[in-house]
Amino acid sequence: MSSSNPGPAKQERIPVDPDKLRAFAAQVLIKLDVPPEDAHRAADVLVYADLRGVETHGMSNNNLGRIYVKGIRNGRINPKAEPRIVHETPVTALMDGCGGLGLSIGARAMNAAIEKARDSFIGMVVVKNSHHYGAAQYFSMMAVPHGMIGISSTNSNPLVLPTGGREPVYGTNPISVSAPSGDEPPFCLDIGTSAMVYQKLILTARLGNPIPLGVAADDEGEPTDDPAVAVESRKLLPLGSVPELGSHKGYGLGILVDVLCGVLSGHGASIQMEDAGYGSVGHFFAAIRVDAFRPLAQFQEQMDDMFQRIHRVPPAKGFDRVLVAGDPEHASEQRRRANGVPLLPAVVDELKELAQDVGVSWDLT
Amino acid sequence: MSSSNPGPAKQERIPVDPDKLRAFAAQVLIKLDVPPEDAHRAADVLVYADLRGVETHGMSNNNLGRIYVKGIRNGRINPKAEPRIVHETPVTALMDGCGGLGLSIGARAMNAAIEKARDSFIGMVVVKNSHHYGAAQYFSMMAVPHGMIGISSTNSNPLVLPTGGREPVYGTNPISVSAPSGDEPPFCLDIGTSAMVYQKLILTARLGNPIPLGVAADDEGEPTDDPAVAVESRKLLPLGSVPELGSHKGYGLGILVDVLCGVLSGHGASIQMEDAGYGSVGHFFAAIRVDAFRPLAQFQEQMDDMFQRIHRVPPAKGFDRVLVAGDPEHASEQRRRANGVPLLPAVVDELKELAQDVGVSWDLT
């Protein structure tokens, strides 16, 4: 629900047209031998993250250059991979991503889940041999216009400590679930299973700010508020932070993601991955037709009523209004579709460099 | 994963044979007009919680008397209700609990999900008009011997604050997911979506201990460590405690439970429930055949390997060993099946009174 700010607030942001940003990202990927359809889909996933305010996962953080172009160039990501379903039933499928681009593999797999749900009420697709797939909510939100509840999850390299341990055993392993509403924004939960994501930690450290006690640990596994220590140790704490506040719950959710994305797909859990950095990962997707249970319109009406009751709850000190998961992302999307995606000057510079490097034109700013 | 201790540690516990405890609970329910099959199932759900160390949800906490007998006697729970499926597809069902006993309704609904999964790979059953169903993990664990992943969840009356709000909007809304392993104990996640459950808070307050800052709030919605204030305000904080530590994640998970149990079933989300106390609630159950995706034996082998790798992680200060969700419950179950369920003397007294009151014999201690 929260967006992270990848730079000092005082730096003036440069608004960029989201359609142009999307076209640019697609061109870059096409230059790197990604088939046009996959490249356009991947670009859509990236810019959706920017629109929704999930800046750690979009162009705002130059993930295009830092993760995907880099991964293709160093041979880790195969741009021409053709993901394929290797086993299926009417309601399930196992997809082999064949080492391709997670952004487009994710969309293909979620589409397969939606198709299955259309025919058989539920569709569940797990993926092995994929890579970093961007913002989890892109895929869960794909189900919503079809009157379905969408689920999306991915595992990743170990970065989070288990309760009572001093070495990371799971990645920030996000879970996203989206559901249709009527007049209100769709419900959209998109949460990492650590207390804080690593990118945000790095940013806080870069700004010289202390980090809250309970998001990261030192080398011994003890909580630290020293950003330098935390960035060095690369040991995040689970959602719930410490045992007294329920860290075993966040840790358990992280392992649940590994069970669904890593073990059910056969790809391997976070702790079974040999690879460091943006290595290969597994995903889990599901689509569930609401009208398998009750008429969609009734469901939407009750969702709206729930949202509205929550919005009427008196806010605590320091808050204007009580929000529901999906509210901040929806507001960001409305704002940024109208006013553009606000990029930091440093990111614009990086993207310009990337354009020159890859050999596409930059006419966005 | 953690068990709570419903009494001062120094009080000597009285070990009780679990089979006798189960038979006693069934007899009490039968006396109250619960049909024998439902009564025996309900008793099994209750004593399973005790065996697994989830003492807040079993006989150890006298939930039999405090929740179920009380609910039947005051007319809230209909002991003779005949839950029925009101809408279904090959992979989904909506069950109307007809105001009956949640313990047995839950088992019926989970059985329906398992049956559907057996035929069609996935089964998903939502329930409306049910009541307090006990320990969520009983139902998710029902799937495991069938080579399935099980999911179980229930909503409940508002007790937890949303991030940024000063009135509760959701219940402690637990999520449980279990999955088969081979030699290792099954994976079993069973977590409330608040930082701490209310029963544990009450206990801490009763013992005069301070509560950790981050589990409960005062009347204004500000975190408090004063147990008296916390018990009085009845305002728990979400998993993640405060915004800096990711409270919006726990809050979002709590609302997700409401979407699945309350809105998908049509029962109503926590905030839409008029009722106070142990009112009527909705549930969500799912069963997923592992072999819809890959051979069960391969899945189990990889689960075991994941568990074993995690067990080898060096423990942090104050811990002997890193555990996985399901490990502590499995250990408790082994211990208590052998040595009996250790009840507090005060609880034994309450159960004896209940026996006399209802008119069944007590020969357990």
Image (spheres, coloured by chain):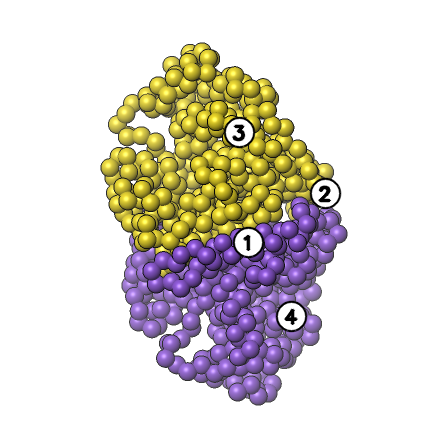
Chain colours: A yellow, B purple
Residue B121 position (above or below residue A22) = below
Tag 1 and tag 4 share a subunit: yes
Q: Residues within 10 Å of mark 2 (few under 14, many from 20)?
A: some
Question: Residue visible at 27% across and 47% down?
Answer: A225
- List x then y, in percent, for residue A86: 68, 38
Among the 4 quarters of the image, the one containing residue A81: top right
Q: Does residue B323 appear in this view?
A: yes
The answer to whether the residue labelled 1 contacts the one labelled 4, judged by CB atoms less than 8 Å apart, is no
Amino acid type of the residue that numbered disc 1 sits on in the rendered structure: Asp
Mark-to-mark CA distance, 3 and 4:
52 Å
The image quadrant that residue A11 belongs to is top left
**Disc 2 sits on a residue from what chain?**
A
Few, some or many C-alpha atoms within 10 Å of disc 4 (few <14, some 14-19, many ≥20)?
Answer: some
**Which residue is label 1 attached to?**
B305
Q: What kind of residue is marked 2?
A: Thr
Label 1: state its secondary structure. Answer: helix
Amino acid type of disc 3?
Answer: Ile
Which numbered disc covers residue A77? 3
Q: Which residue is mark 4?
A: B41
The earlier-in-sequence mark between 3 and 2 is: 3
Q: Could you tell me the amino acid type at mark 4? A: Arg
- Which is closer to the viewer, label 3 or label 4? 3
Q: Is residue A293 above or below residue A246?
A: above
Residue A89 - label = 2
